[in-house]
Amino acid sequence: MHMSTSEIRAAFLEYFRTEGHQVVSSSSLVPHNDPTLLFTNAGMNQFKDVFLGSDVRSYSRAATAQRCVRAGGKHNDLDNVGYTARHHTFFEMLGNFSFGDYFKRDAIIYAWTFLTKVLQLPKEKLLVTVYATDDEAYDIWAKIIGVSTDRIVRIGDNKGAPYASDNFWQMGDTGPCGPCTEIFYDHGDKIWGGPPGSAEEDGDRFIEIWNVVFMQFNRQADGTLEPLPRPSVDTGMGLERISAIMQGVHSNYEIDIFQTLIRRAAEVVGIADLENKSLRVIADHIRSCAFLVADGVMPSNEGRGYVLRRIIRRAVRHGRKLGAKDVFFYQLVGTLAELMGDACPELKSQQPVIERVLKLEEEQFVRTLDRGLALLDEALEGLGDMRQIPGEVVFKLYDTYGFPADLTADVVRDRGFTIDEAGFAVEMDKQRERAKGASSFAVDYNKRLKIDQESEFVGYECLSSEQTIT
Ligand code: ATP
Ligand code: MG
Ligand code: MG
Ligand code: MG
């Protein structure tokens, strides 16, 4: 059965509506009342206080299609874009929620019924994982659903490794969390990759489509787990991933929305090869950038605005790489508004603002981009056998040419180079000292944005724990 992205979104909400769920609108990408969060990264964010018991709603079951951005903070997929078939900076998460209503058994039955009855996916293409010690979930899959035990994998909480499965879900360093069960789809043996839990799992053969979290705890700042007042359920299914399956393609970038955006991007930068990786990056980035501006974020030198600026500049760089001569990025906004304006009316009403902001940002950056790239080329030539760009070069590019450090890393990644992040941080420190020395009233606009995992709360300016970004 072939279904468009819009049809799947509608079918999901309708199914859960008939199962007694209140259909709730997506919340903004800017979590205004949650300073622990950079951007909305999951459907459960807007219900955080309901899970914690401090907010009560008139319903105990809800369903949403939530817009999400994962480009910083606990869940950061920016560096995956262009490299995996399944990651975006912006995506829509379909979710059903129970606030102290149903728990493990019904949550699993709903997910399975939606996939195998409503969408009619073949059972033999699906695989499930459960939290290592969750015998209850294991038994529900094995005995009630009837999944054969060779298709049920137990996974623990692997800390650190970016791809390694982790079956303990948490939205951030603090807040609601719990063990989960995930449903994977097998895209077939022509694609590299192994099942979850195997050494080859970071391939794209087995793709996680749905994560069902049994919300049971509230993680405290000191790391301890406090039980929630009522065990609840939070689920999330990536709309683009399930669309790929329903449209008979492997990569998210081959689905309807992305094909249209990629064709438009090829047209505005003037290339014919639709397979080019940079087109995928641009098609991804226009969505996060347009939706972020629609939700009120403006490019700036710190916090959320700096994340937006970084994404815009990366997209601009990829466009120039493809040969774009004119300011191009904003020209994709109209196409996006046509594609997604129904699901998100803000996109249409804000279209002129989004275009203006993106155009201005690109115009500013292209003034220094080519000279910065030339400097980088020169630096690469001078490196000899070294495969790391020195911190001073990364800093010069940042300071003089407006290259965010992750953009420099992105430019050199395909050529087999990395950047010296620690060396870059040292240069940033020196600059801060200089700024302080210059005037005791100086405002430090280039303040380093750094997350400190140990500290209780560092504010929405925090980015990823692995990266120090300025
Ligand atoms: P992965 O392991 O593939 O990175 P995840 O476990 O980090 O996914 P969850 O936090 O469980 O993802 O989010 C719930 C669902 O949202 C996932 O099962 C997936 O379908 C979808 N999803 C997560 N991250 C992305 C992304 N960056 N782009 C598109 N879809 C995503
Ligand atoms: Mg992930
Ligand atoms: Mg996962
Ligand atoms: Mg998951």
Image: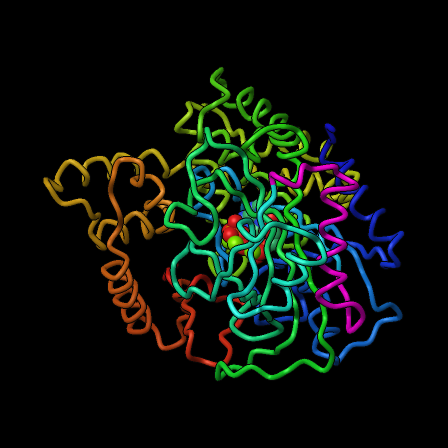
Q: Which quadrant of the render holds ligand 4?
A: bottom right
Viewport quadrant of the N terminus? top right
- Say above or below: 34 vs 347: below
Q: Nearer the viewer, residue 58 or 284?
A: 58
Q: Is residue 102 magenta?
A: yes
Is residue 270 among what the camera can see? yes
- The residue that appears at 82% across and 76% down in the rendered structure is 56
Look at the picture and state if 284 lies above or below 460: above
Q: Quadrant of residue 171?
A: bottom right
Residue positioned 87% across, 67% down in the render: 59
Residue 188 horizontal/vertical position (percent): 52, 32
On the rendered structure, is 87 left or right of 109?
left
| 229 relative position to 412: left or right | right
Task: Please give left or right for residue 120 compared with residue 384 in the image.
Answer: right
- Which residue is most to the left? 384
Residue displayed at 55% across by 22% down? 268
In the image, 72 versus 97, the foreground residue is 97
Stretch of the chain drawn in magenta: 97-125
